[in-house]
Image: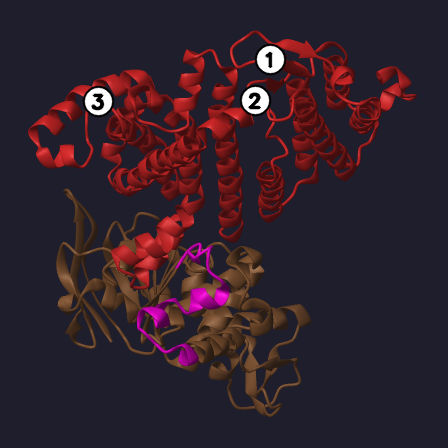
Chain colours: A brown, B red
Amino acid sequence: MISLENLTKQYGATAVVDGVSMVIERNSITVIVGTSGSGKSTLLRMINRLVEPTRGRVLIDGADTTGEPAHLLRRRIGYVIQGYGLFPHRTVAENIATVPRLLGWDEARIRIRVAGLLSVFQLDPGAYAHAFPHQLSGGQQQRVGVARALAAEPAVLLMDEPFGALDPIIRAKAQDDLLDIQRRFGTTILLVTHDMDEAFRLGDRVAVMSHGRLLQYDRPAVLLTRPADPFVSRMTGISDRAMRLLSLTTAGEAALPGASDGPAVAASASLREVLSELMWCGAESAAVMDADGTRRGRLTIAAILARGRPG
Amino acid sequence: MALTVPRLRRLDPLGALLAVAGATAVMFLPFVIFKSNRVVPGDPRGLLEVLPAWAAFACQASLLLAATAALGVSNARVRLGAALLGVTVVALAVAAAGDALTPAGNKVVRVAPGAGVWVLLVCLGLLATDAITRMRPGPGRRVLFLAVFTAAAGLALAHGTFDHLSVMREYAVNADRFAREARQHLWLALGSLAAAVVVALPIGILCHRVPRLRAGVLGTLNVIQTIPSIALFGILMAPLGALAGAVPLAAALGIRGIGAAPAAVALFLYSLLPIAANTVAGLKRVPRAAVEAARGMGMTNWQVLTGVELLLALPVILTGIRIVLVQNIGMVTVAALIGGGGLGTFVFQGIGQTAIDLVLLGAIPIVALAFSAAVVLDALVEVMDRARQ
């Protein structure tokens, strides 16, 4: 658990981050979203003390982060940035081994860890361990950047626009991979983005920032249905907020008992996808199927539409 | 010679120029200069006058071959082979002329290569370097070429092939001093470089970290660069002389107003700008994301500097060191004027005595040293750059 208490960063008279307090739950993905200049990156960088706060403090599992030298703190916290910052003069394996080397792991343990991470991130160790970063595609570089950040098994992972340089198809894949990684390692992830779709797709909770202030911090559905500030509704988008809301719920969660002679849809599909499918087929209801092929229930258009309304 | 080549359209322009210059040299310029002693004016001799007819013919045939390759062959290996054949033949012919014109046991007679030989060697040298450039050899191959050429020249010198030529006559008289001055030359060039690296690297790092300092510091170093070397020696004489007078230890260390001390200090000062400026440029080139990531992962400032920033800047810093090394090897020559020693001693002595052979005894090794240093360091820069692009 990470607690930010009245965190403030001032440069001269201007507060880049202004009195932000929030609690980040363990084993969750929290997304900080805001326009450029909103202070979201500075907030992130105050957690690993790349920026020292002017006021306020950061507690990780109850311990103040100023209790140890900053470089030791950072070795316990994963960090991924836009552009990844891979070391061009070091191989992929050496890049991934950076923090374990700093922590003085023995070589055998490092080798096993690097090989394990390469396979988790779908990079064939034989082909890529000794490649240099410039020989990789953008998507591969991004995966190496995340693998490097996770190498020393940090409990917390900070990510600053980690997918900003990827094209849309690779970005979607990278986002799915991140959700997998989070489930697999149970890492507490704090991610900064300016992309609301990304925030809704990844975030268990989403924090909206503007001009250094935290405007709202809640589950995505609450941001849509009960925005605390006009800026939040502008960020979440008024014109398609109903569709956004539908995309937050899966067919499995919304399925009602009963049979349907309409099209079969996967329980993992979002209501937005089910609605689209029903409109396309001209059907009134869909049969919701689990991954193993058993029938979970049915969904009618009326039931879906009811889910797209606030409250 | 150009007239014998049938298809003019495929003539190599550089080759044509070199062939015409070489042919002119062979036909109109003296091959060797014969002097009955060291100071009398020389007497020009042509190739046919000094060598047996068969040898002169073989020499001319080889040069014709080289000219043909230069004119009409595009294969770089053939061109290089032809140029090296030409260099070897000319060198051996000059050596043979020296042997032929020197009566047995006579140490007074001087035989020097004539203008024709120098022009031929320049033409063939250009042909060879052009061929090597066209072959685009990697850094390792270039150093290998240099090593093979140096070894061949060294073997010929050790074997005494050129012992009857005037430069080697000067060497025979000055052998002890030559070794000492060559060591002094290298010591001044490399010592001032090492001191400059130790000082300029931190200056460069500081200028990178504190941009406000950059213009002032680099500007000051730039002003030092513009002072002519003789003037700088003069400027340094007074303070170093005063230092030696006031501090006995300094005098005991050999620091005086003249001699090696002001030369070393001047070379050191000249070396600062290229190294400091290239350190700044190299550090500026380091990707900011890599530095940010290094800090974010918990490297200490020292680890970021030595493990990431300086390593990534190294090719550019080495380029600065290359500039300084080549510049120093040349500039040490002038140090001889204030008693600093080095190979320049022979150059200025030779000028004083109007003994051109003595000038060459100093100048040829200086040029060879500077050239070798440039080739080796260029190769090193390329290797570093390739591994870190």
Looking at numbered disc 3 in the image, what kind of residue is underneath it?
A: Leu
Please state which of the two labelled residues, at mark 3 or mark 1, is closer to the viewer.
Answer: 1
Nearest the camera: A241 or B136? B136
Is residue B164 shown to the viewer in this render?
A: yes
Is A102 in the magenta?
yes
Q: Are marks 2 and 1 in contact (CB under 8 Å)?
A: yes
Q: Choose between A192 and A196: the one closer to the eye.
A: A192
In the rendered structure, which segment of residues is drawn in magenta? Answer: A81-109
Q: Chain of mark 1?
A: B
Q: Which numbered marker is on residue B35?
A: 1
Residue at x 51%, y 87% (from the top left corner): A256
Give the structural element (helix, strand or loop) at label 1.
Answer: strand
Residue at figure coordinates x 23%, y 33% from the top left? B213
Task: Locate the N terminus of chain B and report the quarter of the image it occupies.
Answer: top right
- Residue receiving disc 2: B166
Labelled disc at residue B236: 3
Q: Quadrant of residue B266?
A: top left
